[in-house]
Image: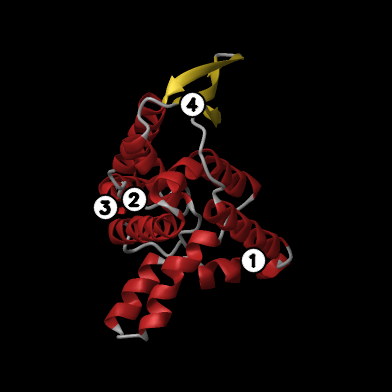
């Protein structure tokens, strides 16, 4: 299922959401200029689980140990990776920012990304493959969207065998089905020595953190 848009207008300009998308685009275009240096860029700014635990045992500098948790959110592995992530963020992020407020949304986004990264690192401690991408933080946005707008309609491109149809699906059904795929895939990946692929548990961790944090970050409305 591919979301095309949502029928859920926001009432302000999502400055923070646009800024996050722009920052990811700038980093990606920088990646395109690196040529053979791209792999070393991934290793430096991506989050490598085994290296993190090595630095913990070696009592490495705090900044060196934890900076990749943030920088990895802005690094992507290809056109499909960044377009898919930014498209989801564009569709769902504006309404969440509208409901939380600009600065709360910014904090919410990064905390969701950190929670996603910690869960992925914990469950793949021996992996030397860098975890990259904004999908963990975006999963948190999806969790908040589901909690806040469960009945919002998502205009969805649905493949049916060799044909495609465009239908309206409730956010509850669309995001719920998306999360089920992430969770089941994550369970199947446990104990598998994979050399790469999708960080399923980052999606699960980000989504759950978004569900839990959304009520805490929601702006209080003054009564009159």
Foreground of the two, 8 or 128: 8
Mark 3 nearby-residue class (10 Å; few <14, some 14–19, many ≥20): few
Whether label 1 touches label 2, CB < 8 Å: no
Instruction: For mark 3, give the secondary structure.
Output: helix
Instruction: Decide: is 38 above or below 136.
Output: below
Whichever of labels 3 and 4 marks the residue nearer the N terminus, that label is 4
Q: Do the residues labelled 3 and 1 touch (CB within 8 Å)?
A: no
Q: Which of 78 and 196 is in front in this view?
A: 78
Q: How far apart are marks 4 and 2 (CA)?
A: 24 Å
CB within 8 Å, label 3 to label 4: no
**Residue plotted at (25% across, 48% down):** 212
Question: What SS does tag 2 mark?
Answer: loop
For disc 4, the marked residue is: 154
Quadrant of the image occupied by residue 111: bottom left
Q: Which of marks 3 and 1 is in front?
A: 3
Secondary-structure class at tag 1? helix
Q: Which of pointers 4 and 1 lies earlier in the amino acid sequence?
A: 1
Q: Which of marks 3 and 4 is in front?
A: 3
N-terminal-most mark, 1 or 2: 1
Q: Mark 2 points at which residue?
A: 219
């Amino acid at each position: 299922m591919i979301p095309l848009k949502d029928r859920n207008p926001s009432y302000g300009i999502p400055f923070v959401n646009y800024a996050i998308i722009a920052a990811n685009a700038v980093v990606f275009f920088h990646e395109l200029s690196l040529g053979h240096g791209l792999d070393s860029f991934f290793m430096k700014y991506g989050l490598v689980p085994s290296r993190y635990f090595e630095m913990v045992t070696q009592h490495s500098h705090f900044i060196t140990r934890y900076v990749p948790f943030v920088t990895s959110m802005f690094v992507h592995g290809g056109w499909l990776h960044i377009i898919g992530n930014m498209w989801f963020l564009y569709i769902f992020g504006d309404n969440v920012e509208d409901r939380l407020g600009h600065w709360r949304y910014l904090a919410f986004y990064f905390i969701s990304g950190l929670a996603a990264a910690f869960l992925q690192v914990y469950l793949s401690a021996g992996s030397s493959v860098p975890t990259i991408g904004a999908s963990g933080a975006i999963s948190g946005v999806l969790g908040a969207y589901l909690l806040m707008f469960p009945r919002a309609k998502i205009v969805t491109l649905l493949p049916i065998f060799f044909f495609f149809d465009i239908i309206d699906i409730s956010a509850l059904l669309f995001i719920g089905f998306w999360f089920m795929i992430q969770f089941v895939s994550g369970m199947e990946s446990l104990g598998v020595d994979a050399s790469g692929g999708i960080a399923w548990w980052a999606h699960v961790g980000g989504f759950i953190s978004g569900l839990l944090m959304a009520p805490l970050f929601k702006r209080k409305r003054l009564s009159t």
